[in-house]
Image (cartoon, grey):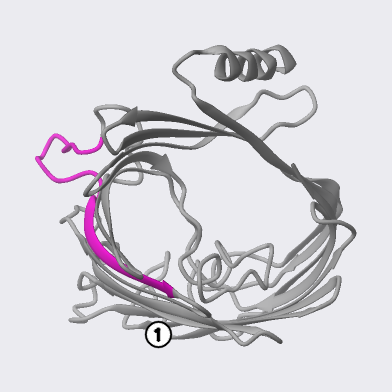
Amino acid sequence: MKKTLIALAVLAASGASFAQVALTGNVTMGYQAQANGKDNVTASSEAAGFGNDTAEVNFVATEDIGGGYKATAKMSLGGITRAGAAGGQDATLTLATPVGALVLGTVKAADYLGGGLAGVGAYYSGWNGKVFSDRTVRDTVSYVVPVGAFTVTATYQEGATTGALGMGFGSNGAGAVTAQSLTGLSASYASGALNANGTYLQFASSNTGYSATKDQTRLSGNYDLGVAKLGAGIVVTNKNSNTAGVANPKVTDVAFGASMPMGAVTLGLNLVSRKLDDSLNAVGANISGTANGTSLQFDYALSKRTAVIGNYARWTQAATGIAAGQEASSQYQLMLSHSF
């Protein structure tokens, strides 16, 4: 694995077509304890121990083609553990032109709320697979156009379960669609202390019945007050009718974030919720109701690139559905993080 990383670095640095190459990364290790509350599907459980949370290397190579054109290739290697192999993570290739940028990528995007503008970086661990749905890898094609303080993006993203080249769309033997692709349009605004985004996604038809998404509307933003940064956002997902005959299953996700720097210390707060309307869980029971999550975080910067991170979170699980008698889960982490 070491030889592979060295070879990649040498290749990036020596090739004449690589005008600029940047190598960055992050290693975060520490202790985590988690208690998972029981619900209508799973029993309660506990786990704790030391280990590696992140070990990632990022390569960014740029070439000025001339005439207002520039190519940028980004590649991440992650999952680097002792006696393990380097695993592929996100990869993008961007061709910038005088009128916009074409971006091709295979990426696992961060959660829109917890990992985006609304979250303001106030909870390191994130809400994926807890209150909000876990993220998936998608092949994407996007075109990005800057317009003053705005950035407009049109995107096409292939089905989450078909990540190989030439495998973005297909059908089963009966002719039904096997994965949901999507098209979307978003506009972002960044000026001074204000950042905002609005996105609309339209999903293709699927053979997954009531669980298939029809469309999704996203709104989020944050504002830097100086003494604190505040963020908020909402995502509304409309789904196909379920087998019980309910007309309009819907999922509404909401998040609020606050981050307060005080010298070397930064305090963070996240409040999130997921409201399920007329949905079904894995065993076919109606799970209308609300799941919630709260997190507190403490960051201490030992230097510009090294920090101690401590956080605590408590939530009700929405991934398998809301049911009577569901117990809350909790987690705390204490980690040392270094970026380079």
Left or right position of 268 against 280 = right
Look at the numbered disc 1 and give the secondary structure of its residue: loop
What predominant SS class does the magenta segment belong to?
loop
Taking the spot 49% from the left edge, 63% from the top edge, the residue there is 111
Membership of 187 in magenta stretch: yes
Name the residue at the front extreme: 67
Which kind of residue does numbered mark 1 sit on? Ser
Is 327 situated above or below 51? below
Instruction: Reply above or below: 138 against 290.
Output: above
Q: Is residue 235 left or right of residue 207?
A: right
Mark 1 = which residue?
288
Image quarter for residue 189?
Answer: bottom left
Is 100 situated above or below 222? above
Residue closest to the eye, 126 or 224 = 224
Q: Is residue 70 above or below residue 285?
A: above
Magenta segment range?
Answer: 168-190
Q: Position of residue 156 (x, y in %)?
A: 23, 50
